[in-house]
Image (cartoon, rainbow, N blue to C red):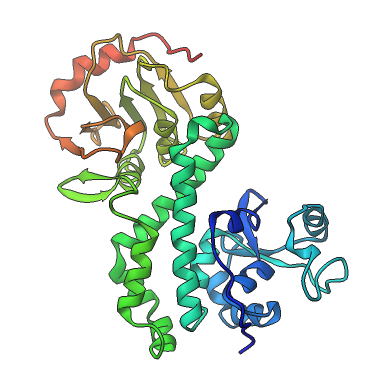
């Protein structure tokens, strides 16, 4: 089967040395993943090729160009500089896998070692993400916004998978048939549970359901047709990160006095640069708002208003809820007054 006997020990440090930033993705090389899973690189790529339909699209995997490979060779930790058959005489440009691609690998590679290493990868990825979020004040702001946005996007995608596990099992029925001799449905459920930890990943009550905070805000903002108004005096970078889930042609106004100056001008500018099609205008509230509101499509037949128990910057950090208020007429004087407020200038 082309497997090696040595087992690669998966730790945060060992993974950090094998993760590269290419084409805007955090990726790992085929040779490094082969080492982790105990394969020769050729045998590893053969397994992927046999399941090529699962890896269609650059968001799962892609092959490096000659220029990208040369740039990678300059990295002092790059595995292309060591190992059997590697180095400047390698006969092909390596393939790289994104995080989503690595998760897909977990449904392809077979055997007891593959299951063990997949579980270790999932847990280590989560610890690395938790460290980033817990120590965000120590990370340079321009780097942090990119990491936060990618983390939020991945968390959102993974939460969708977890919330619809029945659909996933149907889509992966062919995988279960292939692996029925080595993987049970219980094993698969445990692996999916490792992707999102209910206690640590930020969950809340939305429309009487317990769900991911990222998914709740994504579903709310995604329903807007013309406008999104967010009233929240305590905002932060996460507030902007969640707003990126609104449709691109929707006008967004964020009403806030930015109490505590948690959102900085550099973060706002970086967000606008990263997402130029999403227009966010900042206005003051006048210091009289304590509760938080989300207003969709104000003044239209599609108008909807949601009450939020916590600021979106803290979404999921504590037990809270988001509920829809169907008595929207009473809000008209408040919203009309907010629209007259001056712009908020960030420092």
In this view of the protein, can residue 72 be seen by the observer? yes
Q: x, y percentage for residue 300?
A: 26, 30
Measuring 15% from the left and 47% from the top, which residue is drawn there?
208
Residue at position x 45%, y 52% in the image: 127
Q: Quadrant of residue 181?
A: bottom left
Q: Residue at x 34, y 48 (%)?
A: 201
Left/right of residue 288 with respect to residue 258 in the rendered view: left
- Is 45 placed above or below 206 here? below
Q: Observer-nearest residue: 154 or 254?
A: 154
Does residue 105 appear to the left or right of 293 in the view shown? right
Q: Nearest the camera: 93 or 332?
A: 93
Q: Is residue 179 left or right of residue 306?
A: right
User: Image quadrant of residue 284?
Assistant: top left
In the rendered image, which quarter is residue 78 located in?
bottom right
Query: x, y percentage for residue 249?
Result: 45, 36
**Left or right of 205, for residue 225:** right
Residues 299 and 186: in front is 186
Please state, as top left, top right, bottom left or bottom right, where the N terminus lies in the image: bottom right
């Amino acid at each position: 089967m082309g497997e090696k006997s040595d087992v690669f020990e998966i730790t945060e440090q060992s993974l950090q040395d094998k993760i590269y930033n290419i084409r805007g993705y955090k990726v790992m090389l085929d040779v490094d993943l082969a080492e982790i899973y105990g394969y020769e690189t050729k045998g590893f790529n053969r397994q992927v090729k046999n399941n090529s339909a699962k890896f269609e699209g650059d968001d799962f995997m892609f092959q490096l160009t000659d220029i990208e490979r040369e740039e990678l060779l300059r990295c002092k930790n790059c595995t292309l500089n060591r190992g059997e058959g590697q180095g400047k005489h390698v006969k092909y440009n390596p393939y790289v896998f994104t995080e989503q691609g690595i998760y897909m690998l977990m449904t392809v590679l077979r055997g007891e070692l593959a299951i063990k290493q997949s579980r270790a990868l999932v847990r280590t990825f989560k610890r690395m993400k938790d460290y980033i979020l817990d120590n965000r004040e120590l990370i340079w702001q321009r780097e942090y916004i990119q990491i936060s946005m990618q983390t939020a996007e991945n968390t959102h995608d993974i939460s969708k998978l977890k919330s619809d596990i029945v659909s996933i099992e149907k889509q992966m029925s062919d995988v279960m048939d292939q692996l029925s001799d080595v993987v049970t449905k219980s094993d698969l459920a445990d692996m999916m549970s490792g992707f999102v930890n209910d206690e640590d990943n930020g969950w809340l009550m939305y429309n009487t359901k317990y769900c991911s905070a990222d998914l709740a805000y994504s579903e709310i903002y995604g329903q807007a047709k013309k406008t999104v108004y967010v009233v929240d005096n305590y905002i932060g970078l996460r507030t902007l990160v969640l707003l990126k889930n609104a449709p691109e042609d929707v006008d967004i106004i964020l009403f806030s006095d930015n109490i505590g100056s948690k959102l900085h001008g550099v973060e706002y500018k970086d967000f606008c640069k990263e997402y130029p099609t999403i227009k966010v205008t900042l206005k003051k509230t006048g210091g009289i708002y304590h509760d938080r509101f989300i207003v969709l499509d104000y003044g239209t037949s599609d108008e909807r208003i949601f009450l939020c128990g916590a600021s979106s910057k803290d979404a999921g950090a504590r037990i809270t809820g988001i509920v829809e208020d169907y008595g929207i007429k009473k809000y008209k004087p408040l919203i009309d007054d907010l629209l007259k407020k001056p712009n908020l200038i960030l420092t």
